[in-house]
Structure formats: C-alpha cells, structure tokens
Image (cartoon, rainbow, N blue to C red):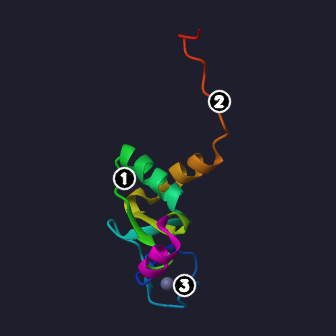
Amino acid sequence: MALYCESCMKLVEGEICPRCRSRKLREPEAGDFCLVEEVPYMQAEMLKELYADNGIPCTTRSALGAAITVKLGVNVGRVRLYVPFERFDEAKDLYDAFFNAPFVPEEDGPCGN
Ligand SMILES: [Zn+2]
C-alpha cells in the first residue's frame, strides 16, 4: 500500500519519501492529486487530452519553473502531470498504453483513388 507525500504530491512506496526525505506520509485519500509522471511539454499536452477524453481531471505543473521555461521556450519544458488518487490507476494505465502502444499505421480508407 503506497503512502502519500503532501509536499511532493506523490505516492511513495515505503516510509520515507525518496524525493524530499519527509517521514510525514499519510494514507492517500480521494481527491489527493498524485504525480503520474514527468513528461516533455508536447507529451503532456497529448496526455491531458487523453485524460480529458476519459473524464479524468488532470492538473499540471512546470518541472523547470516558469522563469526558465520562458527563457528556453515552452516546448523544451518538462511538465508534471497530476490526477486525483481515485483515478490514479486508470491514469497510469492510460499513460502506459499511450507510450507502449505499438505503432499502427493508418488503415487505407475506402476512398482510395
Ligand atoms: Zn516528498
């Protein structure tokens, strides 16, 4: 059973958060936003659409910080994706399916010339 680190908004295996070293972890509750993954900006945009299509609320934060993102241009930024705990497993499955799906070439339509 994973615990939840409030300061990182992240599900943690074990008793200490590997990121911030906090021991103040608690059991996750519905409505806790949990980090799904940190992804490049363009992928975040696609995942946000995917989650919207599946009715999963999703919030994002820039991993680099706004000032750096502006300086480098938004497309090189990395984004952290968060979803509510009760949708986390679903979101993770969608994430895995999104990145592990084999490339399927588009079928030729019936209107070939
Ligand atoms: Zn933490």
User: Can you tell which mark lies on residue 105?
Assistant: 2
State left or right for residue 66 relative to residue 94. Answer: left
Q: Looking at the picture, which amino acid does disc 3 mark? A: Cys
Which residue is drawn at the image coordinates 45% and 59% (left, top)? 88
**Residue neighbourhood size for the residue with mark 3, other residues' Cα within 10 Å, grouped as few (<14), some (14–19), many (≥20):** many
Q: Amino acid at mark 2?
A: Pro
Inspect the image, locate mark 1, and give the three-letter code of the amino acid beneath it.
Ile
Observer-side mark, 1 or 2, equals: 2
Dot 2 falls on a residue whose secondary structure is loop
- C-alpha distance separating marks 2 and 3: 42 Å
- Residue located at (42% from left, 78% from top): 66
- Distance between the Cα atoms at labels 3 and 1? 26 Å
Q: Is residue 51 left or right of residue 112?
A: left
Indicate yes or no: mark 2 CB to ligand 1 under 8 Å: no
Dot 2: few (<14), some (14–19), or many (≥20) neighbours within 10 Å?
Answer: few
Q: Nearer the viewer, mark 3 or mark 1?
A: 1
Closest to the observer: 33 or 26? 33
- Quarter holding the C terminus is top right
Q: Is residue 74 above or below residue 108?
A: below
Residue 41 pos. (x, y %): 50, 62
Q: Tags 3 and 1 in contact by the CB under 8 Å rule?
A: no
Q: Which residue, given by chain and number where applicable, does mark 3 sit on?
A: 17
x then y, percent, for residue 3? 48, 76
Q: Earlier in the sequence, mark 1 or mark 2?
A: 1
Query: Can residue 26 be seen?
Result: no
Q: Residues within 10 Å of mark 1 (few under 14, many from 20)?
A: some
Q: Which residues are magenta?
A: 66-74
